[in-house]
């Protein structure tokens, strides 16, 4: 492995590493626009010019760092010489002479590479005084597709977007047209930019030429609080950043995780936060339906415990799980089911569109429209006892409850999540589940089910809590709250521990923070989680111990859709 | 030296029968290829190296050395650069229209030397006549077994094709040409890797100019020593075609030993048009810095012209008399480079655009005092920093205007107009 | 590229054009390399220019994304995206021709054809544009009409040539 010295910092790199990546290894940021680690190197923008001494002999011209690969010993690179600074100033001047002064109305302001590099490497005045700026008349707000809008005047012709559609999305809608000063990006008439990753081009566009139609003018990015989380749109579990202003989410952006979603996420996933603001929110515990009054937490939990204890004599106690529950919450529900002596527990999941998120290992494909069916089932919400005994035919699973008459046999039916799936909002489902004698509903959404519940418990959305999900590849990923929940919402983990303590006082001894403690307990119990602790879950997640599942996944190609296991 | 010089490359000008294979063979055509096929490929490369032949397309890179760099992978390709779009250059067109077999023979010898079985002649789309002549010559050569599956009975398979461009000067840049050959936009590639290793279709490729390759049969038949005996010194050898145009009485292509003094070339072209006074000349195409009349005795070889601050390039000589506005001339060249820039890299795309705007403003008398410094600064930000040499080419004339002819520019600024009237060449449309 | 009336079929390239393309495809190791010749053929078939349907036809024929083919079409000066008349006139106005009166040739064309640069005459006969160096500087001023070079022009010769175009 050759070594290279960049600004007096020496590092050993894999042969073939380019200087931008090598620089990052030693904390040297070489400015660049067109380079992206997942796209072919084109060396077009010329912003990354550096000076290289090859074994003492200075290369006569500055070299583009992105296309200069370290293959041998003896390279000394400088990014801080007067020549490099002059090149950067000259390049910034070229970028800006035809660039519109749109900052006041441009979405990108605050996260714009042109702004950042102009400030850091450019000059504060313009010498382009009497000429007219080049414009693309009629191309100032062109929808390239349903999710992406183009303002060609702002484009710096880096071609990241074009290369993305051909090399990563492999749909090739975008092209580079014309020649010289009039080059532009665009689509062929009749073939708009429509693929499930289309909004990723907005992420990788260094300037405000490409904007998201959903986010356009929604918020100034410097007012956004950015917190890491996970997408709940499907079972791939893309890592995201929740960008919100005081609890109002304005957008999701993908967060880099080479093991899962790499740099990408799908367009559908980006919309999944919208329901949190659109659907009615449950904010106080309720007793006896929406027309009745509210009730205090203690009283509500006491009533729930009472109902759960008085069971089989009057009918079954069933738990309708949710693939949106975290592993911790699902495990606590399973414990509750144990306490109530109920084998009736299951997790329904909707089937969604089949999306493949590209990564360097062939990509991950998701077909289930929720993030944690596997985690919820591993945590114990499968028909039968937590010991894994197989279900008998009489178990009231989600098929019996949602498609059959199972609820009518229930003395108590606990719906673990008022937004467990599309069915949760249909009148037919409400009518069926209401046949249970006593209906308890936990959830963030004041869904039609919650409105008819005998007891309704308000809990946070996934962006307001911490927990873990298990994705389609049995990767365990941890996420944290982006902002606190509203109203009287209490974390569901806390609520369930509180409820369980009414069955077994030792639950009250559980130390805070409760989610971590719950996880460590369940990890000690469930073989697939053996050896994992809350504190030591890596940032990119970790594979569960499921050799059979892993071996099968290793042979699944990106094209084949994984079967439900 | 020039008096006793017999034309080599243009020996078949005025001999229409040389267009046919039979006619070409009458004066020793394809004997070079026959000889080469009996030599080791490496020996052919050595002979060309020894001759000192330097590329005739503009860069002047030693041809034999370029051939010796060819990578090991197979298949290999030869791409003949017949894109000839440098303003002032028309010599390759002459060679192709008048003596196509000379080019085919040169390509064939090169293919043998670098073990390439396929040669594409990338010819600019506008040269329809030359393309048709070449296609016919290739067909003839294939039918006669000179080319094809068993070139001259040697067992060597050699396929040659004409590939027509579609109108883009940048496709004359070797990697732009390769991209265009592969059916893409003619956008130059990042180097390294060099075409010798990763060229056409990812395979090792030699790219050589038409005139360069036309020298090769003669080097084989008459020897590297003979070739070296022509020219100025061992770094500037062989015959050279000079394409001279502009304000001369007899514009045309003239063959001389490389290094002919400009004065002699001008004389051969009939002297100044309508007895005008020489003001300035461009020695090597639009990218070459403009030289003043005082350089009239300059030896037109690679090194001498470089020492004088310009470049021989393709030896496209453009002569300008004292009715010429140099600002207007350079503005027109700036417009050319702006139009032909591929648009990939920032300094060339934005810089050539800016320079054209600035120079037109200067031409119209709307320039300001600081414009000279500004132009030089822009040139400094393009030169050495663009992705391909077009950026470096574009700044050549501009720099030479500001550094070598500033008083004329200053006059435009001061007078707030162009001091040179537009010259009428044809009266009021009489003839 | 000589021009004729468009011979378009809904299925894309007509059979003889496709046959010509198939012969040319054999010259190259990749499909994509046949794109420039394919576009030349298509432009001839579609009457001297490349409407969107021609581009889509070529893209389908060579199994390339339409955006890629469109990118190639718009890069090169000899591919046209709008009608150019039966005779496309290109007058070189680069420096060597500028030094020998090319502007007077442009003026002559403008007076004779009575259209602006790049505009097609009402009878669909021709259009003229200025062009970059055509490699005929020794016979300046000069112009290309279709595929043919007309050299050593004078205003009168230019008028004669234009009047002879059908």
Image (spheres, coloured by chain):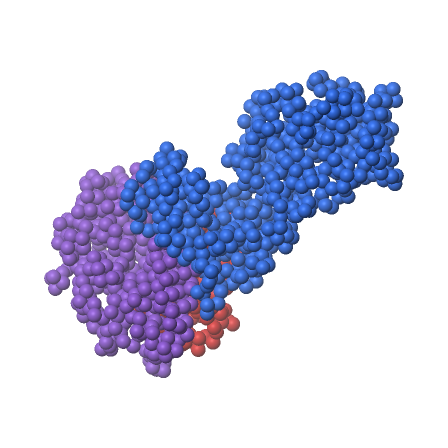
Q: Is residue A135 left or right of residue B105?
A: right
Residue drawn at x 18%, y 62% is B299
Residue A155 or A538: which is nearer the viewer?
A538
Q: Which chain is purple?
A: B
Q: Position of residue C34 (x, y in %)?
A: 43, 48
Residue A174 makes an appearance in the image: no
Residue A532 or A238: which is nearer the viewer?
A532
Q: Position of residue A119 (x, y in %)?
A: 48, 55
Residue C144 or B339: which is nearer the viewer?
B339
Residue A308 makes an appearance in the image: yes
Residue drawn at x 44%, y 75% is C110
Residue A64 or B280: which is nearer the viewer?
A64
Residue drawn at x 37%, y 42% is A8
- Identify the image quadrant of the N terminus of chain A: top left
Q: Is residue C24 left or right of residue B19?
A: right
Q: Is residue B204 above or below residue C95?
A: above
The quadrant holding residue A387 is top right
> Which hue is chain A drawn in?
blue
Q: Which chain is red?
A: C
Residue drawn at x 22%, y 57% is B302
Q: Is residue B322 left or right of residue A9?
A: left
Q: Is residue B147 above or below residue C101?
A: above
């Amino acid at each position: 492995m050759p070594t290279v010295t960049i600004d007096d910092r020496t590092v050993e790199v894999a042969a073939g590493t380019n200087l931008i990546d090598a620089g990052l290894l030693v904390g040297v940021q070489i400015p660049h626009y067109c380079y992206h680690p997942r796209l072919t190197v084109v060396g077009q923008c010329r912003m990354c010019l550096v000076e290289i001494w090859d074994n003492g002999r200075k290369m006569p011209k500055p070299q583009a760092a992105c296309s200069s690969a370290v293959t041998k010993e003896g390279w000394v690179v400088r990014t801080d010489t007067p020549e490099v600074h002059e090149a950067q100033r000259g390049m910034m001047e070229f970028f800006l002479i035809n660039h519109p002064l749109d900052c006041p109305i441009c979405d990108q302001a605050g996260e714009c590479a042109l702004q950042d590099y102009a400030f850091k490497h450019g000059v504060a005045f313009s010498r382009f005084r009497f000429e007219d700026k080049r414009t693309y008349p009629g191309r100032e707000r062109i929808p390239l597709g349903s999710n992406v809008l183009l303002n060609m005047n702002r484009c710096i012709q880096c071609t990241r977007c074009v290369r993305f559609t051909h090399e990563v999305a492999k749909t090739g809608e975008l092209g580079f047209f014309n020649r010289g000063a009039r080059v532009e990006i665009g689509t062929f008439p009749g073939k708009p930019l429509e693929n499930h990753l289309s909004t990723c081009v907005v992420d990788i566009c260094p300037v405000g030429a490409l904007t998201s139609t959903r986010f356009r003018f929604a918020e100034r990015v410097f007012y956004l609080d950015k917190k890491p989380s996970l997408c709940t749109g499907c079972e791939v579990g893309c890592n995201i950043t929740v960008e919100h202003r005081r609890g109002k989410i304005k957008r999701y952006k993908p967060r880099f995780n080479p093991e899962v979603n790499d740099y990408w996420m799908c367009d559908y996933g980006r919309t999944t936060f919208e329901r949190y603001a659109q659907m009615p929110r449950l904010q106080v515990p309720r007793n006896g339906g929406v027309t009745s009054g509210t009730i205090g937490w203690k009283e509500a939990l006491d009533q729930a415990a009472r109902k759960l204890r008085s069971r089989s004599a009057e009918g079954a106690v069933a738990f309708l799980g949710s693939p949106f529950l975290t592993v911790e919450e699902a495990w606590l529900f399973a414990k509750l089911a144990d306490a109530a002596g109920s084998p009736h527990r299951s997790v329904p999941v909707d089937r969604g569109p089949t999306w493949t998120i590209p990564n360097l290992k062939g990509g991950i494909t998701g077909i289930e429209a929720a993030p944690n069916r596997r985690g919820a089932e591993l945590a114990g919400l499968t028909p039968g006892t937590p010991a894994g005994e197989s279900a008998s035919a009489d178990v009231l699973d989600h098929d019996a409850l949602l498609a059959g008459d199972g609820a009518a046999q229930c003395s108590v039916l606990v719906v673990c999540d008022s937004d467990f799936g599309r069915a949760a909002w249909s009148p037919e489902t409400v009518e069926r589940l209401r046949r249970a004698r006593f209906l308890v509903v936990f959830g963030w959404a004041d869904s039609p089910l919650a409105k008819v519940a005998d007891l309704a418990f308000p809990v946070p959305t996934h962006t307001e809590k911490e927990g873990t999900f298990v994705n389609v590849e049995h990767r365990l990923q941890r996420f944290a709250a982006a902002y606190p929940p509203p109203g009287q919402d209490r974390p569901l983990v806390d609520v369930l521990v509180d409820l369980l303590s009414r069955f077994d006082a030792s639950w009250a001894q559980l130390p805070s923070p409760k989610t971590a403690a719950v996880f460590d307990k369940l990890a000690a119990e469930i073989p697939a989680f053996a050896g994992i602790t809350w504190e030591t879950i890596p940032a990119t997640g970790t594979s569960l111990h499921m050799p059979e599942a892993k071996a099968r996944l290793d042979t699944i190609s990106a094209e084949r859709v994984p079967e439900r296991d | 030296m020039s008096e006793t010089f017999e034309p080599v490359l243009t020996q078949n000008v005025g001999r229409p029968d040389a267009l046919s294979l039979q006619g070409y063979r009458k004066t020793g055509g394809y004997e070079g290829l026959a000889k080469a096929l009996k030599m080791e490929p490496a020996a052919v490369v050595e002979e060309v190296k020894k001759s000192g032949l330097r590329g005739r397309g503009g860069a002047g890179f030693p041809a034999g050395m370029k051939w010796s760099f060819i990578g090991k992978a197979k298949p290999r390709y030869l791409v003949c650069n017949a894109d000839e779009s440098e303003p002032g250059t028309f010599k390759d067109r002459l060679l192709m229209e008048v003596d196509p077999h000379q080019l085919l023979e040169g390509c064939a010898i090169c293919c043998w030397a670098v073990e390439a079985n396929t040669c594409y002649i990338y010819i600019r789309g506008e040269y329809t006549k030359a393309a048709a002549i070449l296609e016919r010559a290739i067909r003839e050569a294939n039918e006669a077994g000179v080319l094809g599956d068993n070139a001259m009975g040697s067992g060597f398979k050699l396929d040659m094709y004409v590939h027509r461009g579609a109108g883009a000067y940048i496709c004359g840049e070797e990697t732009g040409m390769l991209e265009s050959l592969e059916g893409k936009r003619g956008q130059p590639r990042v180097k390294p890797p060099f075409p010798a290793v990763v060229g056409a279709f990812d395979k090792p490729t030699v790219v050589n100019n038409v005139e360069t390759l036309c020298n090769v049969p003669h080097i084989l038949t008459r020897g590297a020593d003979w070739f070296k005996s022509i020219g100025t010194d061992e770094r500037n050898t062989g015959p050279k075609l000079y394409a001279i145009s502009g304000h001369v009485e007899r514009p045309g292509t003239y063959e001389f030993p490389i290094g002919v003094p400009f004065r002699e070339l001008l004389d051969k072209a009939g002297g100044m048009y309508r007895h005008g006074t020489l003001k300035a000349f461009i020695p090597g195409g639009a990218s070459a810095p403009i030289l003043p009349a005082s350089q009239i005795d300059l030896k037109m070889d690679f090194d001498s012209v470089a020492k004088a601050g310009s470049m021989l390039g393709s030896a496209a000589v453009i002569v300008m008399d004292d009715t010429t506005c140099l600002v207007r001339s350079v503005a027109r060249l700036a417009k050319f480079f702006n139009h032909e820039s591929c648009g990939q890299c920032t300094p060339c795309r934005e810089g050539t655009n800016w320079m054209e705007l600035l120079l037109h403003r200067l031409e119209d008398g709307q320039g300001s005092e600081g414009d000279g410094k500004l132009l030089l600064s822009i040139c400094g930000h393009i030169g050495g920093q663009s992705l391909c040499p077009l950026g470096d080419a574009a700044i050549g004339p501009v720099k030479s205007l500001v550094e070598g002819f500033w008083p004329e520019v200053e006059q435009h600024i001061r007078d707030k107009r162009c001091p040179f009237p537009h010259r009428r060449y044809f009266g009021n449309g009489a003839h | 590229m000589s021009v004729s009336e468009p011979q378009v079929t809904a299925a894309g390239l007509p059979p003889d054009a496709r046959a010509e393309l198939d012969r040319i495809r054999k010259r190259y190791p990749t499909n994509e390399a046949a794109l420039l010749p394919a576009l030349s053929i298509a432009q001839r078939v579609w009457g001297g220019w490349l409407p969107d349907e021609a581009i889509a036809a070529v893209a389908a024929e060579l199994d390339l994304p339409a955006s890629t083919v469109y990118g190639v079409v718009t890069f090169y000066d000899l591919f046209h995206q709008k009608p150019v008349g039966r005779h496309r006139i290109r007058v070189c106005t680069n420096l060597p021709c500028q030094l020998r009166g090319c502007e007077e040739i442009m003026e002559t064309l403008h007076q004779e054809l009575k259209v602006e640069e790049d505009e097609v005459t009402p009878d669909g006969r021709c259009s003229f544009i200025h062009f970059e160096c055509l490699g005929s500087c020794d016979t300046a001023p000069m112009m290309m009409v279709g595929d043919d070079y007309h050299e050593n022009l004078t205003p009168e010769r230019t008028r004669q040539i234009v009047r002879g175009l059908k």
